[in-house]
Structure formats: C-alpha cells, structure tokens
Amino acid sequence: MAFVTRQFMRSVSSSSTASASAKKIIVKHVTVIGGGLMGAGIAQVAAATGHTVVLVDQTEDILAKSKKGIEESLRKVAKKKFAENPKAGDEFVEKTLSSIATSTDAASVVHSTDLVVEAIVENLKVKNELFKRLDKFAAEHTIFASNTSSLQITSIANATTRQDRFAGLHFFNPVPVMKLVEVIKTPMTSQKTFESLIDFSKALGKHPVSCKDTPGFIVNRLLVPYLMEAIRLYERGPPGFPVRPLELPPPPLQSQPEQLHGRPRLISWFSAFD
Ligand SMILES: NC(=O)c1ccc[n+]([C@@H]2O[C@H](COP(=O)([O-])OP(=O)(O)OC[C@H]3O[C@@H](n4cnc5c(N)ncnc54)[C@H](O)[C@@H]3O)[C@@H](O)[C@H]2O)c1
C-alpha cells in the first residue's frame, strides 16, 4: 500500500514535468528505494535540502523505523545548526519530515519522479529485478542510480532500457556527515545524466567526484588494499607503533563516537568508507 497522497503526487508531477523540459534534469523529486542505513541517510539529506522524497521499503514496520531514525538524526542536526533558535530548529525538523512520504510499492510512485536512488540489498539479481520492473513504470526522463559499493553499474543498468539515464551514485556512511559522493559513469551514461547527478549532489551540499565503472570505484579501490596491508602488518607481529587503521576511526567518526555503535573500530572504519 502506498502512503502517498494524491495532492502530494500532483505537486510532484507538475514540478517534474517543468524540469524535464530543461536541458539537464533539475532533480526536484527523488524516490529512494531501501530505507536502511544508507537509504534513510540519502532521504534525510535530500529532504533537508529542499527536495520532495518518497522513501520505499518492503514493509510499513521498516519504514516506520526508518522515519523514526531520520527524525532522531534531524533533531541532532537541528540542535547544532539552530543552537541559538530552538523554535527554528523544530520548524526545520517538521518541514524536512513533511517532505518525506513513504511507500511499500515502488512501481506506483516512480511515474513522476526525476531520480530513483536505489540503496537495497547488495545483490545483483535483486537489484536487476527491481530496476527491470521500475523501468516500465518510471517517466521517460527519470534517471536511475544505484548506491552499490561493489557491483558493476553496467551490469545493473543492462536490466533496463535506459542505460543512457543510468549511473552510480555512491554515498558514504554516515550520509548526513560524509561530504564525498562518487558519481559513476558507464560507457552508456549520457553526459546530460552525468551532469544532472553532479548538480544534484552539489544541491545536497556534497562534494561529487567523477568515477569510471571499475571495481571499488576510487575510495574502496584505495582503502581496501590499505586496510589489508594494515592487517598483514599486524599479523606479522606487534608493529611497535600504532597502526592507524586498526587503532583509530576516521576523523568524522572520532568527533562522533556514537556513530561507532559499539562495534570494533576497524569495522567502523570500513563502514565509514564502504
Ligand atoms: N552500509 C554502508 O556503509 C554502505 C555505504 C555505501 C554504499 N552501500 C550500499 O548501499 C546499499 C544499501 O546498503 P545499506 O547498508 O543501507 O543496507 P541496509 O541493509 O541497511 O538497508 C537495505 C534496505 O533495503 C531494503 N530492501 C531490500 N530489498 C528491497 C526491495 N526489493 N525493495 C525495497 N526495499 C528493499 C531492506 O528492507 C533494508 O531496509 C548496498 O548496495 C550497499 O552496498 C552501503
């Protein structure tokens, strides 16, 4: 059952049509599929920067938890951002939350969206099935993007008939904190799609970088061998000096110890850059 009102979809539809006529797609309305760790963060940041969002997941229970998590995260942001004006902080939280509708039926909400960002389970078959289905229901101009960390974007795009409007949009955890976004271009991604995603990332307040569709993109390609070397050094025997990747979380997490969730720090380091 979709939890999206007719009025909400009408307002979304008119803004999408207007932007579709422009050269680049100016993303106003975003559908985020998957309300887990990454999807909830992406939905939060998109809504907080003036976009209209529909967040999709498999059950109402998951969506309720996801929205609760977004609200808690927004309250933390508001406490810092509006330290001098708590009333403005409350208004910011309410306004942002009111820009996020939820649905358990992706096909019924993508007909008038400018961008679909997928952040579901890391499984090629499941991602392909999802995009193949959505391709039939989404508007002609709609861009599809996957937040996958390890799958080839081309292999996901091939499940659709819109390879020119398909790219990777790789955010980092925690999304509201981490500035970097990798925008992954396949050989079929059009320049218009690529530039639209660069503009969208900037509109989110992020720092986009261009990547080719190669394993690990940029960050994981550098980071994973670095971490493996740290483990090898450690296994060789006590190194006699601190091995930073094993000892310390990265800077944004150091200042936010609650982000560690009590997990071993190496795991936290991995997930921060996943
Ligand atoms: N966790 C990270 O640090 C991180 C960082 C960057 C990218 N990624 C990538 O982002 C994606 C999501 O990762 P995550 O950590 O948020 O996972 P997660 O398990 O926290 O969330 C995935 C969500 O997708 C939902 N889901 C699964 N199949 C679905 C479907 N068919 N339709 C709708 N919803 C569905 C699940 O119910 C769950 O809520 C993965 O591709 C992962 O590789 C993860």
Image: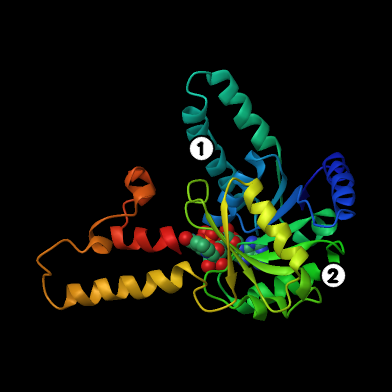
Q: Give whichever of 59, 246 is nearer the camera.
A: 246
Question: x, y (%) of residue 210?
Answer: 59, 65
Question: x, y (%) of residue 139?
Answer: 86, 61
- Residue at the spot 81% in from the left edge and 77% down from the top edge: 161
Among numbered discs 2 and 1, the one appearing first in the sequence: 1
32 displayed left or right of 256: right
Q: Can residue 105 be seen in this view?
A: no
Quarter residue 142 falls in: bottom right
Q: Around disc 1, counting alpha carbons within 10 Å, would you say few (fewer than 14), some (14 to 19), or many (20 or more)?
A: few
Q: In which quarter of the image is ligand 1?
A: bottom right
Q: Is residue 249 visible?
A: yes
In the image, residue 183 above or below residue 65: below
> Tell me, what colour scheme is on the image?
rainbow
Question: x, y (%) of residue 264?
Answer: 29, 59
**Can you identify the residue that label 2 sits on?**
136
30 displayed left or right of 251: right
What is the CA distance from the residue labelled 2 to the residue labelled 1? 36 Å
- Residue at the spot 85% in from the left edge and 45% down from the top edge: 15
Amino acid tagged 2: Lys
Q: Residue 104 carries which label?
A: none
173 displayed left or right of 131: left
Q: Which mark is residue 72?
A: 1
Label 1 beta carbon within 8 A of ligand 1:
no
Q: Give whichever of 35, 146 is nearer the camera.
A: 146
Q: Give whichever of 226, 98 is nearer the camera.
A: 226
Question: x, y (%) of residue 223?
Answer: 39, 69
Amino acid tagged 1: Glu
Tag 1's secondary structure? Answer: helix
- Residue at the spot 73% in from the left edge and 80% down from the top edge: 158
